[in-house]
Amino acid sequence: MAFHLDPQLAAGAIVVGDLLLSRVLLKDDSRRPWIILAPRRPALTELGDLAAPERSILMEEIAAASSALRDLYRPSGVNVATQVDDVAQLHVHVIARQDGEPAWPETLRPQAQGEADARYGAEAAQAAASALAARLGVA
């Protein structure tokens, strides 16, 4: 069985490239830098579905994504989360957060926070994705 990115993840994100295990996506949300890591393995829903060596690789990729966000955006902090309530496919959110942002310090559920949709423009999206790709060393 081949890996296929869930259409809900693909629809709201820009593909940055591939790390050893994960497809790297930039969520199309100009309010905050937001990376999604989707391990390129079929039919996974939980971290425990990955074999132990791949869980280690994923943890290193999460650390690299966190470091890239800290280096590029100097956030107050970086949130890391998995959730299966919206999209069943295993994926990890790595999100740069700033004190004083509209949703701070709540979790990021725009529907619940009443935040308006804020997408990158095409040029800004490409610049952000290119900066992340360069920092993460992905093609």
Image (cartoon, grey):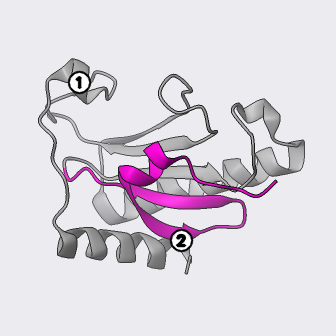
Label 1: which secondary element:
helix
| Residue underneath mark 2 | 17
For the residues marked 2 and 1, what is the alpha-carbon distance in whole angstroms? 28 Å
Q: Where's residue 99, x and y in %?
A: 20, 35
Q: Residue at x 56, y 76 (%)?
A: 138
Give the residues drawn in magenta, as a range.
1-30
Q: Residue at x 20, y 71 (%)?
A: 122
> At label 2, which amino acid type do we have?
Gly
The quadrant of the picture occupied by the C terminus is bottom right
Question: Compared to 76, does 137 lie above or below?
Answer: below
Q: Is residue 122 magenta?
A: no
Locate residue 61 relative to residue 35 in the image: left or right: right
Question: Compared to 51, does 49 lie above or below?
Answer: above
Locate residue 22 relative to residue 10 in the image: left or right: right
> At label 1, which amino acid type do we have?
Gln
Q: Where's residue 68, x and y in %?
A: 45, 62
Which of disc 1 and disc 2 is earlier in sequence? 2
Q: Give yes or no for contact between labels 2 and 1 (Cβ–Cβ under 8 Å).
A: no
Locate residue 90 relative to residue 109 in the image: left or right: right
Q: Is residue 14 magenta?
A: yes
Label 2: which secondary element:
strand
Locate residue 132 relative to residue 50 in the image: left or right: left
Q: Where's residue 106, x and y in %?
A: 28, 21
Q: Residue at x 65, y 58 (%)?
A: 22
Question: Compared to 111, does 130 lie above or below?
Answer: below
Q: Where's residue 100, x and y in %?
A: 14, 33
Give the crowd class for mark 1: few <14, some 14-19, many >=20 residues within 10 Å.
few
| Residue underneath mark 1 | 111
